[in-house]
Amino acid sequence: MTSADTNASADGATPQPLTIAQLAERAGVSVATVSKVVNGRAEVAAETREVVEALIRRHGYRRQKKAAGPAPTLELVFHELAGPYPAEIIKGVQEVAREQTLAVSVAEPGRHTGRSGWVESVLARRPTGVIAVFAALTDAQVSQLHTRDIPLVLLDPIHDATQDCPVVSASNWSGGMSATRHLIDLGHRRIATITGPSHSLASRARLDGYRAALELSGHPVDDELIRTGDFYAETGLAHSRELLRLPDRPTAIVTCNDGTAFGVLRAAAEAGLRIPDDLSVVGFDDLFPSSWLTPALTTVRQPLAEMAATAATMAIDVAQGRPLAHKRVELATELVVRDSTAPPPAPGA
């Protein structure tokens, strides 16, 4: 146990937030060293940084009254910058940022190559707010942002937040249910699904919607027809090849994103199956080029730009001290029926 931990324990109840000078005294380091930690500077030993961060987590940190205000920037943090998904998010955030005369910066922590970690770089930049998109920030990273009064909003989070952060998401359960219900109403009974990763909140909700649609319609859920994917077309292709080789193959496949559906379309073409005459396919997201495929893809539209604009507005409201009407916002999805779904082929056809 460090001396800083001993001092914190002796205090009992959490005191008023500490100043840089008080943090330095408790940590047994210089004021300059604490200032570097607080502001995300890199020139601090990892052990010393952790001692100071532990004190900040326990006691809080009180900025000096003359401290500079936040930079006029909204920082977007993506788990991965790939495909059209990030473009829709950026578009929604930029719409709000322009109205507030804010810039938008984009980060991908997994590829951060600076001398310090990603969160330390954010602390140094001190943006107006941070929007984490489908990203799994650690509890320590979330705590570092909170203790520096940098608003954080989670957009389409991978997992449940362990800290009290505002959250914006889509009605994933309803989307999964409406996609599956559409196929049931067309007469399909052998309906497969290829999910996203099992740790993803959105993926699990869409799978639950799929199950609910089958159960409420009186149709059994066949685990043989449920495959765990990862939102990539290559995995959709591999799983679809397996599904289409089953002795009693599915007549329809619901996917948890459009990219996976593209893999299904490729597998169907390889197997000599016609879409939608021999196999119906439903995607999720309604991103480019879903409406331009031949046949055009039936999919569940996720209002990504609107979700992003909502998250940006929430971050700005928190930064400006305005209370949020709701800390968790769920926007509706919509089934978009196009040409990739039709009644199943007649028996023996």
Image (cartoon, grey):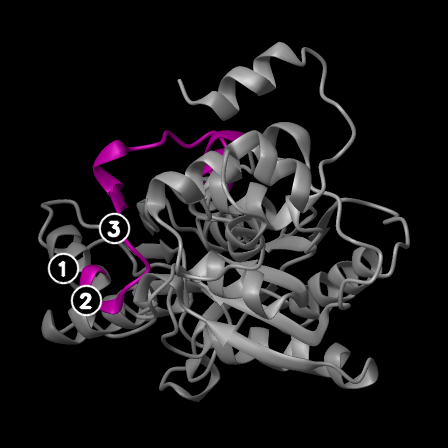
| Of 340 and 134, the residue lying toward us | 134
Q: Which quadrant is home to the C terminus?
A: bottom left
Residue matched to label 1: 238
Q: Residue at x 61, y 11 (%)?
A: 10
Residue 63 falls within the magenta-colored stretch: no
What amino acid type should be assigned to the residue bearing mark 1?
Ala
Q: Which of pointers 3 and 2 lies earlier in the amino acid sequence?
A: 2
User: Is residue 165 shown to the viewer in this render?
Assistant: no
Residue 256 quadrant: bottom left
In-image side of 4 versus 111 (left or right): right
Kindly state the secondary structure of the residue where label 3 is placed.
Answer: loop
- Local packing at callout 3 (Cα closer than 10 Å; few below 14, some 14-19, many 20+) is many
In-image side of 200 versus 7 (left or right): left
Q: Horizontal and vertical percent for residue 173?
A: 56, 44
Cα distance, mark 3 to mark 2? 19 Å
Q: Horizontal and vertical percent for residue 268?
A: 19, 69
In-image side of 227 versus 298 (left or right): left
- Residue extent of the magenta highlight: 207-235
Q: Horizontal and vertical percent for residue 202?
A: 49, 48
Disc sitting over residue 234 in the figure: 2
Kindly state the secondary structure of the residue where label 1 is placed.
Answer: helix
- Local packing at callout 2 (Cα closer than 10 Å; few below 14, some 14-19, many 20+) is some
| Of 244 and 118, the residue lying toward us | 118
Residue 220 falls within the magenta-colored stretch: yes
Q: Residue at x 62, y 82 (%)?
A: 91
User: Is residue 14 shown to the viewer in this render?
Assistant: yes
> CB under 8 Å between callouts 1 and 2?
yes
